[in-house]
Amino acid sequence: MKALIPQEIIEKRIFMIRGHRVMLDVDLARLYGVPTKRLNEQVRRNIKRFPEDFMFQLTKNEYQNFKSQFLISSLRSQFATSNRGGRRYLPYAFTEQGVAMLSSVLKSERAIQVNIAIMRAFVKLREILSTHKELAHKLNELERKIEKHDAEIQAIFEAIRQLMKPPKSHPRKIGF
């Protein structure tokens, strides 16, 4: 079955904020095919389903840092829905659990399919990160072994140099 949304598109919309992998409300709304305002409206109507570890609102500083860090021109155009020229509120960030909970408040067929694709992207990302951690650990072990071997090789070279030195000759006294 062909994916509704390519995995790569979803993966590019997962960010690390406050130590959590999250997706922003504007990206989720776009993927679900609903206005951001409607997505957040459904969340507010079901706010008990979204504790802080499922969803949080970015601070003004986080939002400014985020915009400058990722240079998101596409988001800027999406944010321009207000008559005052931009968002009236700061974006919400949804953790993996929050995205899963969205499936219970957004009940369209598209929402179900998009939610499955997003969950798969989070799982894939977790697997990739796990592989990288294992690889980093093995690399650290290898570096320690090499450092140990380097010291041993240096000691061998030093011993060889000592053996290669000509013996100290003592001046002979010629006795008459």
Image: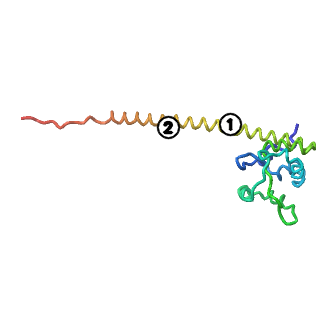
Q: Residue 74 location, x and y as percent? A: 81, 57
Residue at horizontal 80%, vertical 55%? 91
Query: Vertically, is 153 above or below 8?
Result: above
Assign a secondary structure to mark 2: helix
Residue at horizontal 82%, vertical 51%? 27
Q: Residue 19 location, x and y as percent? A: 70, 47
Q: Quarter holding the N terminus? A: top right
- Name the mark on residue 147: 2
Query: Vertically, is 146 above or below 54?
Result: above
Residue that label 1 marks: 131
- Return the disc, 1 or 2, that comes first in the chain's sequence: 1
Q: Residue furthest front?
A: 48
Q: Residue 170 location, x and y as percent? A: 19, 36
Distance Cα–Cα, label 1 vs label 2 = 24 Å
Assign a secondary structure to mark 1: helix
Which residue occupies the foreground of this view, 160 or 47? Answer: 47
Left or right: 141, with 91 as reference point: left
The reply to whether the C-beta atoms of the residues labelled 1 and 2 are less than 8 Å apart is: no
Q: Residue 147 location, x and y as percent? A: 49, 37
* Number of disc labels: 2
Crowd around label 2: few <14 · some 14–19 · many ≥20 (10 Å): few
Which residue occupies the foreground of this view, 19 or 168? Answer: 19
Left or right: 3, with 169 as reference point: right
Residue at horizontal 74%, vertical 45%? 21
Query: Vertically, is 148 above or below 54?
Result: above
Snapshot quadrant of residue 139: top right
Residue at horizontal 61%, vertical 36%? 137
| Identity, as a three-letter code, of the amino acid under mark 1 | Thr
Q: Quarter holding the C terminus? A: top left
| Identity, as a three-letter code, of the amino acid under mark 2 | Glu
